[in-house]
Amino acid sequence: MSEPEIKFEEKEPEVVLIERICARLRKLLWLHHGHGVYLYGDDGEMQCSSCMIDFKRDPINKIEQEFERQAIEVAAKYFHKIV
Ligand SMILES: [Zn+2]
């Protein structure tokens, strides 16, 4: 009795290209979002211990929501200074 053949699904070249572009954009976002001293990047990880975003795995909408939350927080602090 032979072992069943395992077929690995190959991705379309366009999908691979999009995944590579997304990975590069996530890396740029991770490196330049303003929390340089809090970045963790060992073993290919892209995390920030300040805003607790996992730039490698978190969905884009979660990252976007966290940035919006931070912007509102900064705006509120500024507003309280001028009022
Ligand atoms: Zn951060």
Image (tube, rainbow, N blue to C red):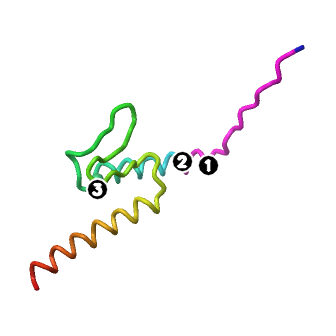
Mark 2 is surrounded, within 10 Å at the Cα level, by few (under 14), some (14 to 19) or many (20 or more) other residues, namely few
Residue 66 at x, y percent in the picture: 36, 62
Q: Quadrant of residue 81?
A: bottom left
Amino acid found under the numbered disc labelled 2: Glu
Q: Main secondary structure of the magenta part?
A: loop
Q: Give the numbered dot on residue 19.
A: 2
Rendered residue at 39%/65% (across/down): 65
Mark 1 is surrounded, within 10 Å at the Cα level, by few (under 14), some (14 to 19) or many (20 or more) other residues, namely few
Gap between marks 1 and 3, in whole Å?
26 Å
Amino acid found under the numbered disc labelled 3: His
The correct choice, above or below, for 6 with respect to 21 in the image is above
Please give left or right for residue 82 compared with residue 33 in the image. Answer: left
Q: Quadrant of residue 43?
A: top left
- Which residue position holds label 1? 15
Q: CB of residue at label 3: within 8 Å of ligand 1?
A: yes
Disc number lying in front (1 or 3): 3
Q: Which residues are magenta?
A: 2-18
Query: Is the Cβ of the residue at disc 1 closer than 8 Å to that at disc 2?
Result: yes
- Which residue position holds label 3? 33
Rendered residue at 48%/55% (across/down): 59
Gap between marks 1 and 2, in whole Å?
6 Å
Rendered residue at 9%/83% (across/down): 82
Q: Give the numbered dot on residue 52.
A: none
The correct choice, above or below, for 80 with respect to 22 in the image is below
